[in-house]
Amino acid sequence: MASKKTKAKSKAKASPAPVFAAPNPDAVLLGLAIFFLSIAIYIPAMTAGFIWDDDQLLTANPLIHDSAGLWKLWFAPTTADYFPLTSSTLWFEWRLWGWNGAGYHITNILLHGVVAVVTWRVLVALRVPGAWLAALIFGVHPVCVESVAWISERKNTLSQIFLLFTFLAYFRFERNGRNSTFVLAVCCFLLALLAKTSVVMLPFALLLYAWWQHGTITRRDLIRSIPFFIASAALGIVTIYFQYGRAIGSEVIPIGGAPSRIAKAGMAIWFYVSKTLAPFNLIAIYPTWKVTPPPWYEFLPDLGLVAVFVGCWRLRVHAWARAVLFGFGYFVVMILPAIGFLKMSYMRLTLVADHFQYISMIGVIALVVAAAMRWVPKVAWRPVATVAVLGLCVLSWAQASIYQSEETLWRDTLSKNEATWQGHNHMGAALYMKGERPAAFEHFKRAVELKPENPEVHNNLGLGYATFGQMDKAIEEYRRAISIKDDAAMRTNLGNALQQVKRFQEAIEQYREAIKMDANNVGAHTNLGLALASDGQVDEAMEQFRIVLQLDPNSQIARQSLTQLLQRKQGR
Protein backbone atom coordinates (compact mmCIF):
# COMPACT_ATOMS: atom_id res chain seq x y z
CA MET A 1 0.00 0.00 0.00
CA ALA A 2 1.40 3.37 -1.02
CA SER A 3 2.18 5.89 1.68
CA LYS A 4 0.39 9.23 1.94
CA LYS A 5 3.59 10.93 0.88
CA THR A 6 3.81 8.79 -2.26
CA LYS A 7 0.18 9.50 -3.10
CA ALA A 8 0.65 13.22 -2.67
CA LYS A 9 3.70 13.15 -4.89
CA SER A 10 1.83 11.17 -7.56
CA LYS A 11 -1.07 13.57 -7.41
CA ALA A 12 1.22 16.56 -7.76
CA LYS A 13 2.72 15.03 -10.88
CA ALA A 14 -0.73 14.67 -12.39
CA SER A 15 -1.62 18.34 -11.91
CA PRO A 16 -1.46 20.58 -14.96
CA ALA A 17 1.65 22.56 -15.70
CA PRO A 18 1.47 26.37 -15.42
CA VAL A 19 -0.35 28.06 -18.29
CA PHE A 20 0.00 31.59 -19.64
CA ALA A 21 3.54 31.67 -18.23
CA ALA A 22 6.14 33.93 -19.82
CA PRO A 23 7.62 32.01 -22.77
CA ASN A 24 11.31 31.22 -22.82
CA PRO A 25 13.35 31.60 -26.03
CA ASP A 26 13.41 27.85 -26.69
CA ALA A 27 9.62 27.65 -26.37
CA VAL A 28 9.23 30.54 -28.81
CA LEU A 29 11.41 28.77 -31.37
CA LEU A 30 9.52 25.51 -30.91
CA GLY A 31 6.21 27.32 -31.32
CA LEU A 32 7.41 29.09 -34.47
CA ALA A 33 8.56 25.75 -35.88
CA ILE A 34 5.07 24.27 -35.42
CA PHE A 35 3.41 27.38 -36.81
CA PHE A 36 5.47 27.77 -39.96
CA LEU A 37 5.57 24.09 -40.86
CA SER A 38 1.81 23.84 -40.30
CA ILE A 39 1.19 26.63 -42.80
CA ALA A 40 3.99 25.84 -45.27
CA ILE A 41 2.33 22.60 -46.37
CA TYR A 42 -0.71 24.65 -47.45
CA ILE A 43 1.13 26.76 -50.02
CA PRO A 44 -0.77 24.98 -52.86
CA ALA A 45 -4.07 26.06 -51.28
CA MET A 46 -3.12 29.72 -50.87
CA THR A 47 -4.01 30.47 -54.48
CA ALA A 48 -7.05 28.18 -54.60
CA GLY A 49 -10.50 29.43 -55.54
CA PHE A 50 -14.03 28.85 -54.30
CA ILE A 51 -15.40 25.32 -54.18
CA TRP A 52 -18.47 23.33 -53.24
CA ASP A 53 -20.77 25.33 -50.92
CA ASP A 54 -18.52 28.40 -50.71
CA ASP A 55 -21.20 30.08 -52.82
CA GLN A 56 -23.94 29.45 -50.24
CA LEU A 57 -21.86 30.68 -47.32
CA LEU A 58 -19.87 33.42 -49.03
CA THR A 59 -19.94 34.38 -52.70
CA ALA A 60 -23.73 34.10 -53.18
CA ASN A 61 -24.80 34.79 -49.61
CA PRO A 62 -26.79 38.07 -49.61
CA LEU A 63 -26.15 38.59 -45.89
CA ILE A 64 -22.39 38.60 -46.49
CA HIS A 65 -22.76 41.23 -49.22
CA ASP A 66 -25.33 43.34 -47.35
CA SER A 67 -23.91 46.29 -45.42
CA ALA A 68 -26.46 45.52 -42.70
CA GLY A 69 -25.77 41.81 -42.96
CA LEU A 70 -23.63 41.62 -39.84
CA TRP A 71 -26.64 42.30 -37.62
CA LYS A 72 -28.78 39.87 -39.61
CA LEU A 73 -26.20 37.10 -39.34
CA TRP A 74 -26.61 37.21 -35.57
CA PHE A 75 -30.27 38.10 -35.11
CA ALA A 76 -32.10 37.34 -38.40
CA PRO A 77 -30.09 34.60 -40.14
CA THR A 78 -31.35 33.00 -43.34
CA THR A 79 -28.55 30.43 -43.55
CA ALA A 80 -28.92 26.67 -43.10
CA ASP A 81 -26.82 26.74 -39.90
CA TYR A 82 -26.38 29.20 -37.08
CA PHE A 83 -22.63 29.84 -36.85
CA PRO A 84 -22.70 33.65 -36.53
CA LEU A 85 -19.12 34.13 -35.36
CA THR A 86 -17.74 32.29 -38.39
CA SER A 87 -20.12 34.13 -40.71
CA SER A 88 -19.07 37.43 -39.19
CA THR A 89 -15.41 36.80 -40.05
CA LEU A 90 -16.47 36.14 -43.66
CA TRP A 91 -18.59 39.31 -43.64
CA PHE A 92 -15.57 41.40 -42.63
CA GLU A 93 -13.27 39.64 -45.06
CA TRP A 94 -15.65 40.15 -47.97
CA ARG A 95 -14.95 43.86 -47.54
CA LEU A 96 -11.22 43.14 -47.68
CA TRP A 97 -10.87 40.43 -50.31
CA GLY A 98 -14.16 40.39 -52.24
CA TRP A 99 -13.84 37.81 -55.01
CA ASN A 100 -10.16 37.17 -54.30
CA GLY A 101 -10.16 33.66 -52.87
CA ALA A 102 -6.55 33.83 -51.73
CA GLY A 103 -7.38 36.15 -48.82
CA TYR A 104 -9.87 33.73 -47.28
CA HIS A 105 -7.58 30.76 -47.80
CA ILE A 106 -4.61 32.47 -46.19
CA THR A 107 -6.78 33.41 -43.19
CA ASN A 108 -7.88 29.79 -42.80
CA ILE A 109 -4.29 28.57 -43.03
CA LEU A 110 -3.05 31.10 -40.46
CA LEU A 111 -5.85 30.07 -38.11
CA HIS A 112 -4.78 26.45 -38.46
CA GLY A 113 -1.20 27.42 -37.63
CA VAL A 114 -2.45 29.08 -34.45
CA VAL A 115 -4.53 25.99 -33.62
CA ALA A 116 -1.44 23.79 -33.90
CA VAL A 117 0.60 26.03 -31.59
CA VAL A 118 -2.14 26.35 -28.97
CA THR A 119 -2.68 22.59 -29.15
CA TRP A 120 0.93 22.23 -28.11
CA ARG A 121 0.43 24.52 -25.13
CA VAL A 122 -2.65 22.57 -24.00
CA LEU A 123 -0.74 19.29 -24.22
CA VAL A 124 2.14 20.84 -22.26
CA ALA A 125 -0.31 21.97 -19.61
CA LEU A 126 -1.60 18.39 -19.41
CA ARG A 127 2.00 17.12 -19.12
CA VAL A 128 1.53 14.83 -22.12
CA PRO A 129 4.86 13.23 -23.14
CA GLY A 130 5.91 14.35 -26.60
CA ALA A 131 3.52 17.32 -26.55
CA TRP A 132 5.50 19.26 -29.17
CA LEU A 133 5.71 16.32 -31.56
CA ALA A 134 1.99 15.52 -31.15
CA ALA A 135 1.03 19.13 -31.93
CA LEU A 136 3.36 19.18 -34.94
CA ILE A 137 1.88 15.95 -36.28
CA PHE A 138 -1.59 17.42 -35.89
CA GLY A 139 -0.48 20.59 -37.70
CA VAL A 140 0.81 18.70 -40.75
CA HIS A 141 -1.71 15.86 -40.75
CA PRO A 142 -3.48 15.28 -44.12
CA VAL A 143 -6.88 14.72 -42.48
CA CYS A 144 -6.81 18.40 -41.46
CA VAL A 145 -6.55 19.56 -45.08
CA GLU A 146 -10.28 19.43 -45.72
CA SER A 147 -10.89 21.76 -42.76
CA VAL A 148 -8.13 24.18 -43.76
CA ALA A 149 -8.11 24.29 -47.57
CA TRP A 150 -11.90 24.61 -47.87
CA ILE A 151 -13.11 28.13 -47.07
CA SER A 152 -16.49 26.94 -45.80
CA GLU A 153 -14.78 24.92 -43.08
CA ARG A 154 -13.51 28.11 -41.45
CA LYS A 155 -15.91 27.10 -38.71
CA ASN A 156 -13.62 24.21 -37.73
CA THR A 157 -10.40 26.16 -37.36
CA LEU A 158 -12.11 29.09 -35.63
CA SER A 159 -14.09 26.97 -33.15
CA GLN A 160 -11.00 24.89 -32.35
CA ILE A 161 -9.02 27.97 -31.35
CA PHE A 162 -11.64 29.04 -28.80
CA LEU A 163 -12.05 25.45 -27.61
CA LEU A 164 -8.34 25.26 -26.85
CA PHE A 165 -8.39 28.62 -25.08
CA THR A 166 -11.29 27.30 -23.02
CA PHE A 167 -9.06 24.49 -21.80
CA LEU A 168 -6.18 26.84 -21.02
CA ALA A 169 -8.43 29.24 -19.12
CA TYR A 170 -10.00 26.35 -17.20
CA PHE A 171 -6.57 24.98 -16.27
CA ARG A 172 -5.56 28.42 -15.05
CA PHE A 173 -8.75 28.71 -13.01
CA GLU A 174 -7.89 25.43 -11.31
CA ARG A 175 -4.58 26.97 -10.23
CA ASN A 176 -5.71 30.45 -9.16
CA GLY A 177 -9.39 29.86 -8.27
CA ARG A 178 -10.39 33.30 -9.58
CA ASN A 179 -13.97 33.74 -10.72
CA SER A 180 -12.83 36.04 -13.52
CA THR A 181 -10.73 33.23 -14.97
CA PHE A 182 -13.68 30.84 -14.80
CA VAL A 183 -15.85 33.41 -16.60
CA LEU A 184 -13.13 33.71 -19.23
CA ALA A 185 -13.28 29.94 -19.78
CA VAL A 186 -17.07 30.02 -20.19
CA CYS A 187 -16.86 32.98 -22.59
CA CYS A 188 -14.25 31.20 -24.71
CA PHE A 189 -16.53 28.19 -24.88
CA LEU A 190 -19.47 30.33 -25.97
CA LEU A 191 -17.35 31.77 -28.77
CA ALA A 192 -16.35 28.24 -29.80
CA LEU A 193 -20.02 27.23 -29.95
CA LEU A 194 -20.90 30.33 -31.96
CA ALA A 195 -18.19 29.42 -34.46
CA LYS A 196 -19.41 25.81 -34.74
CA THR A 197 -21.47 23.77 -32.31
CA SER A 198 -19.55 20.55 -32.96
CA VAL A 199 -17.62 21.45 -29.78
CA VAL A 200 -20.83 20.87 -27.83
CA MET A 201 -19.41 17.87 -25.95
CA LEU A 202 -16.75 19.89 -24.13
CA PRO A 203 -18.50 19.68 -20.69
CA PHE A 204 -18.15 15.89 -20.80
CA ALA A 205 -14.50 16.28 -21.79
CA LEU A 206 -13.94 18.51 -18.74
CA LEU A 207 -15.45 15.88 -16.46
CA LEU A 208 -13.27 13.24 -18.12
CA TYR A 209 -10.27 15.48 -17.48
CA ALA A 210 -11.28 15.85 -13.82
CA TRP A 211 -11.44 12.07 -13.43
CA TRP A 212 -8.06 11.63 -15.13
CA GLN A 213 -6.44 14.19 -12.83
CA HIS A 214 -8.00 13.17 -9.53
CA GLY A 215 -9.31 9.63 -10.01
CA THR A 216 -12.88 10.73 -9.36
CA ILE A 217 -15.49 13.32 -10.35
CA THR A 218 -16.37 15.41 -7.32
CA ARG A 219 -19.44 17.47 -6.56
CA ARG A 220 -17.30 20.56 -7.15
CA ASP A 221 -16.43 19.32 -10.66
CA LEU A 222 -20.10 18.82 -11.45
CA ILE A 223 -21.02 22.30 -10.22
CA ARG A 224 -18.23 23.86 -12.29
CA SER A 225 -19.50 22.08 -15.38
CA ILE A 226 -23.04 23.47 -15.12
CA PRO A 227 -22.47 26.72 -17.09
CA PHE A 228 -20.79 24.72 -19.84
CA PHE A 229 -23.69 22.28 -19.99
CA ILE A 230 -26.18 25.15 -20.16
CA ALA A 231 -24.29 26.75 -23.05
CA SER A 232 -24.05 23.40 -24.85
CA ALA A 233 -27.74 22.68 -24.43
CA ALA A 234 -28.82 26.13 -25.62
CA LEU A 235 -26.66 26.27 -28.74
CA GLY A 236 -27.20 22.56 -29.40
CA ILE A 237 -30.97 23.08 -29.55
CA VAL A 238 -30.48 26.01 -31.90
CA THR A 239 -28.30 23.89 -34.20
CA ILE A 240 -30.81 21.03 -34.27
CA TYR A 241 -33.56 23.51 -35.10
CA PHE A 242 -31.58 24.93 -38.03
CA GLN A 243 -30.44 21.51 -39.27
CA TYR A 244 -33.84 19.85 -39.15
CA GLY A 245 -35.85 22.90 -40.18
CA ARG A 246 -33.61 24.41 -42.86
CA ALA A 247 -30.63 22.32 -43.91
CA ILE A 248 -32.54 19.03 -44.04
CA GLY A 249 -36.21 19.98 -44.28
CA SER A 250 -38.21 17.14 -45.82
CA GLU A 251 -35.16 15.43 -47.32
CA VAL A 252 -34.54 11.84 -46.26
CA ILE A 253 -31.14 11.37 -44.57
CA PRO A 254 -30.05 7.73 -44.97
CA ILE A 255 -28.87 6.90 -41.45
CA GLY A 256 -31.49 4.23 -40.68
CA GLY A 257 -33.11 3.35 -37.37
CA ALA A 258 -31.58 2.82 -33.94
CA PRO A 259 -29.81 -0.51 -34.71
CA SER A 260 -28.26 0.95 -37.87
CA ARG A 261 -27.14 4.10 -36.08
CA ILE A 262 -25.51 2.10 -33.29
CA ALA A 263 -23.71 -0.18 -35.76
CA LYS A 264 -22.54 2.68 -37.99
CA ALA A 265 -21.40 4.74 -34.99
CA GLY A 266 -18.92 2.05 -34.02
CA MET A 267 -17.77 1.65 -37.61
CA ALA A 268 -17.33 5.42 -37.95
CA ILE A 269 -15.19 5.70 -34.83
CA TRP A 270 -12.77 3.02 -36.00
CA PHE A 271 -12.81 4.51 -39.51
CA TYR A 272 -11.62 7.81 -38.08
CA VAL A 273 -8.97 6.09 -35.98
CA SER A 274 -7.69 4.34 -39.11
CA LYS A 275 -7.52 7.61 -41.07
CA THR A 276 -5.66 9.26 -38.19
CA LEU A 277 -3.08 6.48 -38.07
CA ALA A 278 -2.90 5.82 -41.83
CA PRO A 279 -4.12 8.94 -43.73
CA PHE A 280 -4.17 7.43 -47.21
CA ASN A 281 -6.82 7.54 -49.93
CA LEU A 282 -8.56 10.55 -48.41
CA ILE A 283 -11.70 11.55 -50.32
CA ALA A 284 -13.95 14.60 -50.18
CA ILE A 285 -16.97 12.28 -50.33
CA TYR A 286 -16.42 8.74 -49.12
CA PRO A 287 -18.50 5.83 -50.50
CA THR A 288 -21.90 5.47 -48.87
CA TRP A 289 -22.55 2.70 -46.34
CA LYS A 290 -25.61 0.49 -46.49
CA VAL A 291 -27.52 1.35 -43.33
CA THR A 292 -30.41 -1.12 -43.08
CA PRO A 293 -30.66 -3.78 -41.98
CA PRO A 294 -27.25 -3.98 -40.28
CA PRO A 295 -25.76 -7.50 -40.40
CA TRP A 296 -24.51 -8.91 -37.11
CA TYR A 297 -20.85 -8.37 -37.90
CA GLU A 298 -21.35 -4.60 -38.19
CA PHE A 299 -21.85 -4.54 -34.42
CA LEU A 300 -18.34 -5.92 -33.84
CA PRO A 301 -16.75 -2.42 -33.90
CA ASP A 302 -19.11 -1.44 -31.07
CA LEU A 303 -18.03 -4.50 -29.11
CA GLY A 304 -14.43 -3.51 -29.78
CA LEU A 305 -15.05 -0.09 -28.27
CA VAL A 306 -16.72 -1.61 -25.24
CA ALA A 307 -13.80 -4.01 -24.82
CA VAL A 308 -11.25 -1.17 -24.93
CA PHE A 309 -13.05 0.95 -22.35
CA VAL A 310 -14.03 -1.92 -20.04
CA GLY A 311 -10.54 -3.40 -20.22
CA CYS A 312 -8.84 -0.10 -19.45
CA TRP A 313 -11.31 0.60 -16.66
CA ARG A 314 -10.48 -2.69 -15.01
CA LEU A 315 -6.77 -1.86 -15.32
CA ARG A 316 -7.14 1.79 -14.30
CA VAL A 317 -4.63 1.38 -11.47
CA HIS A 318 -2.01 1.53 -14.21
CA ALA A 319 -1.09 4.95 -15.59
CA TRP A 320 -1.19 3.73 -19.20
CA ALA A 321 -4.78 2.48 -18.82
CA ARG A 322 -5.90 5.82 -17.38
CA ALA A 323 -4.11 7.58 -20.26
CA VAL A 324 -6.00 5.46 -22.80
CA LEU A 325 -9.29 6.17 -21.07
CA PHE A 326 -8.58 9.89 -21.17
CA GLY A 327 -7.00 10.22 -24.64
CA PHE A 328 -9.22 7.78 -26.50
CA GLY A 329 -12.19 8.83 -24.37
CA TYR A 330 -11.66 12.45 -25.39
CA PHE A 331 -11.56 11.38 -29.05
CA VAL A 332 -14.83 9.43 -28.78
CA VAL A 333 -16.64 12.03 -26.68
CA MET A 334 -15.76 14.95 -28.95
CA ILE A 335 -16.63 13.13 -32.18
CA LEU A 336 -19.90 11.74 -30.80
CA PRO A 337 -22.20 14.35 -32.44
CA ALA A 338 -20.84 13.47 -35.91
CA ILE A 339 -21.06 9.66 -35.97
CA GLY A 340 -24.65 9.28 -37.06
CA PHE A 341 -26.87 9.32 -33.99
CA LEU A 342 -28.30 12.69 -35.06
CA LYS A 343 -29.22 13.69 -38.58
CA MET A 344 -26.90 16.08 -40.40
CA SER A 345 -27.50 17.44 -43.88
CA TYR A 346 -24.00 16.38 -44.93
CA MET A 347 -24.96 12.77 -44.30
CA ARG A 348 -27.14 12.75 -47.40
CA LEU A 349 -23.77 12.36 -49.17
CA THR A 350 -21.77 10.14 -46.82
CA LEU A 351 -21.74 9.13 -43.18
CA VAL A 352 -18.08 10.03 -42.63
CA ALA A 353 -15.93 13.00 -43.59
CA ASP A 354 -12.42 14.20 -42.79
CA HIS A 355 -13.60 17.51 -41.39
CA PHE A 356 -15.80 15.74 -38.81
CA GLN A 357 -12.74 14.74 -36.76
CA TYR A 358 -10.72 17.96 -36.83
CA ILE A 359 -11.48 18.81 -33.19
CA SER A 360 -11.19 15.28 -31.82
CA MET A 361 -8.26 13.60 -33.58
CA ILE A 362 -5.64 15.12 -31.27
CA GLY A 363 -6.79 12.63 -28.61
CA VAL A 364 -5.56 9.71 -30.72
CA ILE A 365 -2.43 11.50 -31.95
CA ALA A 366 -1.32 12.51 -28.44
CA LEU A 367 -1.98 9.00 -27.13
CA VAL A 368 0.10 7.35 -29.86
CA VAL A 369 2.96 9.84 -29.51
CA ALA A 370 3.01 9.47 -25.72
CA ALA A 371 3.10 5.68 -26.08
CA ALA A 372 5.95 5.93 -28.59
CA MET A 373 7.91 8.23 -26.27
CA ARG A 374 7.57 5.69 -23.49
CA TRP A 375 8.13 2.40 -25.29
CA VAL A 376 10.19 3.14 -28.40
CA PRO A 377 13.94 3.23 -27.66
CA LYS A 378 15.34 6.75 -27.64
CA VAL A 379 17.82 5.90 -30.33
CA ALA A 380 14.96 4.99 -32.68
CA TRP A 381 12.11 7.36 -31.97
CA ARG A 382 13.78 10.52 -33.31
CA PRO A 383 14.42 9.16 -36.82
CA VAL A 384 11.02 7.47 -36.82
CA ALA A 385 9.37 10.74 -35.82
CA THR A 386 11.32 12.66 -38.47
CA VAL A 387 10.29 10.25 -41.21
CA ALA A 388 6.66 10.32 -40.02
CA VAL A 389 6.49 14.11 -40.01
CA LEU A 390 8.11 14.44 -43.43
CA GLY A 391 5.82 11.78 -44.84
CA LEU A 392 2.76 13.58 -43.48
CA CYS A 393 4.01 16.86 -44.96
CA VAL A 394 4.30 15.28 -48.40
CA LEU A 395 0.82 13.78 -48.16
CA SER A 396 -0.68 17.06 -46.94
CA TRP A 397 0.98 19.08 -49.70
CA ALA A 398 -0.51 16.72 -52.29
CA GLN A 399 -3.90 16.78 -50.56
CA ALA A 400 -3.92 20.60 -50.42
CA SER A 401 -3.29 20.68 -54.18
CA ILE A 402 -6.56 18.81 -54.73
CA TYR A 403 -8.53 21.78 -53.36
CA GLN A 404 -7.26 24.17 -56.05
CA SER A 405 -10.60 24.37 -57.89
CA GLU A 406 -13.93 22.65 -58.40
CA GLU A 407 -12.46 20.65 -61.25
CA THR A 408 -9.38 19.40 -59.37
CA LEU A 409 -11.48 18.51 -56.33
CA TRP A 410 -14.13 16.57 -58.21
CA ARG A 411 -11.73 14.84 -60.58
CA ASP A 412 -9.88 13.47 -57.58
CA THR A 413 -13.12 12.53 -55.81
CA LEU A 414 -14.59 10.72 -58.81
CA SER A 415 -11.32 8.87 -59.45
CA LYS A 416 -11.67 7.35 -55.97
CA ASN A 417 -15.47 7.20 -55.62
CA GLU A 418 -17.23 7.16 -58.99
CA ALA A 419 -20.61 6.50 -57.40
CA THR A 420 -21.02 9.89 -55.72
CA TRP A 421 -23.90 11.80 -57.28
CA GLN A 422 -22.71 15.05 -55.73
CA GLY A 423 -19.31 14.61 -57.36
CA HIS A 424 -20.88 14.16 -60.79
CA ASN A 425 -23.28 17.05 -60.22
CA HIS A 426 -20.49 19.48 -59.29
CA MET A 427 -18.09 18.15 -61.90
CA GLY A 428 -20.76 18.71 -64.52
CA ALA A 429 -21.29 22.25 -63.30
CA ALA A 430 -17.54 22.96 -63.38
CA LEU A 431 -17.21 21.64 -66.94
CA TYR A 432 -20.36 23.49 -68.01
CA MET A 433 -18.87 26.80 -66.84
CA LYS A 434 -15.69 26.00 -68.80
CA GLY A 435 -17.75 25.52 -71.94
CA GLU A 436 -17.19 21.75 -72.08
CA ARG A 437 -20.92 21.11 -72.48
CA PRO A 438 -20.89 17.50 -73.83
CA ALA A 439 -18.70 16.27 -70.96
CA ALA A 440 -20.81 18.22 -68.46
CA PHE A 441 -23.98 16.67 -69.89
CA GLU A 442 -22.65 13.14 -69.25
CA HIS A 443 -21.94 13.97 -65.62
CA PHE A 444 -25.43 15.46 -65.20
CA LYS A 445 -26.98 12.28 -66.58
CA ARG A 446 -24.90 10.12 -64.26
CA ALA A 447 -25.92 12.24 -61.27
CA VAL A 448 -29.60 11.65 -62.10
CA GLU A 449 -28.98 7.91 -62.38
CA LEU A 450 -27.37 7.86 -58.95
CA LYS A 451 -29.75 10.21 -57.13
CA PRO A 452 -33.09 10.50 -59.00
CA GLU A 453 -34.87 11.81 -55.89
CA ASN A 454 -32.67 14.92 -55.73
CA PRO A 455 -34.02 18.12 -57.36
CA GLU A 456 -30.59 19.66 -58.07
CA VAL A 457 -29.54 16.90 -60.46
CA HIS A 458 -32.77 17.16 -62.47
CA ASN A 459 -32.36 20.92 -62.68
CA ASN A 460 -28.80 20.59 -63.99
CA LEU A 461 -29.78 17.88 -66.46
CA GLY A 462 -32.50 20.22 -67.69
CA LEU A 463 -29.83 22.85 -68.18
CA GLY A 464 -27.83 20.34 -70.20
CA TYR A 465 -30.78 19.49 -72.44
CA ALA A 466 -31.51 23.19 -72.97
CA THR A 467 -27.91 23.73 -74.05
CA PHE A 468 -28.36 21.22 -76.86
CA GLY A 469 -31.73 22.63 -77.87
CA GLN A 470 -33.76 19.70 -76.57
CA MET A 471 -36.28 21.97 -74.93
CA ASP A 472 -39.04 19.42 -74.37
CA LYS A 473 -36.66 17.24 -72.33
CA ALA A 474 -35.33 20.31 -70.54
CA ILE A 475 -38.84 21.36 -69.53
CA GLU A 476 -39.56 17.82 -68.36
CA GLU A 477 -36.46 17.77 -66.12
CA TYR A 478 -37.22 21.20 -64.66
CA ARG A 479 -40.75 20.07 -63.83
CA ARG A 480 -39.38 16.95 -62.13
CA ALA A 481 -37.03 19.10 -60.06
CA ILE A 482 -39.89 21.37 -58.96
CA SER A 483 -42.12 18.39 -58.14
CA ILE A 484 -39.45 17.21 -55.69
CA LYS A 485 -38.68 20.61 -54.18
CA ASP A 486 -40.27 23.89 -55.18
CA ASP A 487 -37.51 26.42 -55.66
CA ALA A 488 -37.35 29.95 -57.09
CA ALA A 489 -34.24 29.32 -59.19
CA MET A 490 -35.68 26.14 -60.68
CA ARG A 491 -38.96 27.93 -61.44
CA THR A 492 -36.95 30.61 -63.20
CA ASN A 493 -35.11 28.00 -65.26
CA LEU A 494 -38.41 26.40 -66.25
CA GLY A 495 -39.75 29.81 -67.21
CA ASN A 496 -36.68 30.44 -69.35
CA ALA A 497 -37.18 27.14 -71.20
CA LEU A 498 -40.88 27.86 -71.79
CA GLN A 499 -40.11 31.34 -73.01
CA GLN A 500 -37.52 29.97 -75.42
CA VAL A 501 -40.22 27.85 -77.13
CA LYS A 502 -42.58 30.87 -77.09
CA ARG A 503 -45.00 29.49 -74.50
CA PHE A 504 -45.13 32.93 -72.94
CA GLN A 505 -48.19 32.53 -70.72
CA GLU A 506 -46.75 29.42 -69.09
CA ALA A 507 -43.39 31.16 -68.69
CA ILE A 508 -45.08 34.18 -67.08
CA GLU A 509 -46.79 31.87 -64.61
CA GLN A 510 -43.48 30.28 -63.60
CA TYR A 511 -41.74 33.63 -63.14
CA ARG A 512 -44.57 34.90 -60.95
CA GLU A 513 -44.32 31.78 -58.77
CA ALA A 514 -40.57 32.30 -58.48
CA ILE A 515 -41.08 35.91 -57.40
CA LYS A 516 -43.58 34.82 -54.75
CA MET A 517 -40.80 32.73 -53.22
CA ASP A 518 -38.06 35.30 -53.73
CA ALA A 519 -39.27 38.86 -54.23
CA ASN A 520 -35.73 40.12 -54.83
CA ASN A 521 -34.96 37.62 -57.60
CA VAL A 522 -33.57 39.99 -60.24
CA GLY A 523 -33.40 37.27 -62.90
CA ALA A 524 -37.03 36.29 -62.42
CA HIS A 525 -38.22 39.94 -62.61
CA THR A 526 -36.07 40.58 -65.70
CA ASN A 527 -37.24 37.49 -67.56
CA LEU A 528 -40.84 38.12 -66.52
CA GLY A 529 -40.56 41.56 -68.08
CA LEU A 530 -39.18 40.06 -71.31
CA ALA A 531 -41.93 37.42 -71.40
CA LEU A 532 -44.64 40.03 -70.79
CA ALA A 533 -43.20 42.25 -73.54
CA SER A 534 -43.11 39.32 -75.98
CA ASP A 535 -46.73 38.55 -75.09
CA GLY A 536 -47.78 42.13 -75.78
CA GLN A 537 -48.36 43.11 -72.15
CA VAL A 538 -46.32 46.29 -72.39
CA ASP A 539 -47.44 48.12 -69.23
CA GLU A 540 -46.87 45.07 -67.05
CA ALA A 541 -43.47 44.52 -68.66
CA MET A 542 -42.44 48.12 -67.98
CA GLU A 543 -43.42 47.72 -64.35
CA GLN A 544 -41.17 44.66 -64.02
CA PHE A 545 -38.21 46.49 -65.55
CA ARG A 546 -38.74 49.36 -63.10
CA ILE A 547 -38.61 46.84 -60.23
CA VAL A 548 -35.40 45.39 -61.66
CA LEU A 549 -33.79 48.84 -61.73
CA GLN A 550 -34.77 49.36 -58.10
CA LEU A 551 -33.10 46.07 -57.18
CA ASP A 552 -30.15 46.49 -59.55
CA PRO A 553 -29.65 50.05 -60.88
CA ASN A 554 -26.81 48.78 -63.13
CA SER A 555 -29.01 46.35 -65.09
CA GLN A 556 -28.46 47.26 -68.75
CA ILE A 557 -31.07 44.77 -69.97
CA ALA A 558 -33.79 46.38 -67.86
CA ARG A 559 -32.74 49.91 -68.80
CA GLN A 560 -32.58 49.19 -72.53
CA SER A 561 -35.83 47.19 -72.50
CA LEU A 562 -37.65 49.92 -70.61
CA THR A 563 -36.43 52.54 -73.10
CA GLN A 564 -37.56 50.42 -76.05
CA LEU A 565 -41.00 49.84 -74.54
CA LEU A 566 -41.43 53.55 -73.85
CA GLN A 567 -40.55 54.28 -77.47
CA ARG A 568 -43.01 51.63 -78.62
CA LYS A 569 -45.79 53.20 -76.55
CA GLN A 570 -45.00 56.63 -77.92
CA GLY A 571 -45.15 55.25 -81.46
CA ARG A 572 -41.56 56.04 -82.33
Image (cartoon, grey):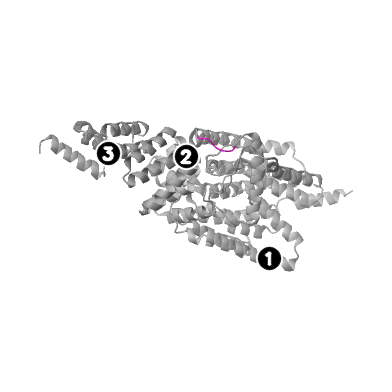
At a point 37% along the width and 32% down the height, the residue shown is: 517
In the picture, measured across the screen, residue 319 lies left or right of residue 525, that is right
Bin the neighbour count of mark 2 within 10 Å (Cα to Cα): few under 14, some 14-19, many 20 and up: some
> Residue flagged by tag 3: what amino acid is it?
Val
Residue contact between numbered discs 3 and 1, judged by CB atoms under 8 Å:
no
In the picture, measured across the screen, residue 207 lies left or right of residue 157, that is right
Q: Quadrant of residue 463?
A: top left
Q: CA distance from mark 3 to mark 1?
A: 68 Å
Q: Quadrant of residue 297?
A: top right
Bin the neighbour count of mark 1 within 10 Å (Cα to Cα): few under 14, some 14-19, many 20 and up: few
In the image shown, does 314 or 253 lie closer to the viewer?
253
Magenta part of the chain: 251-255
Disc 3: which residue = 501
Disc 2: which residue = 452
Spot occupied by residue 516 in the image (x, y as percentages of width and height): 35, 30
Task: Say what secondary structure mark 1 lies in.
Answer: helix
In the picture, measured across the screen, residue 18 lies left or right of residue 419, that is right
Q: If you read the primary sequence from the N terminus, does the residue marked by circle 2 or circle 3 appear first?
A: 2
Rendered image: mark on residue 384: 1
Bin the neighbour count of mark 3 within 10 Å (Cα to Cα): few under 14, some 14-19, many 20 and up: few
At a point 75% along the width and 59% down the height, the residue shown is: 374
> Residue flagged by tag 1: what amino acid is it?
Val
Q: Is residue 108 visible?
A: yes
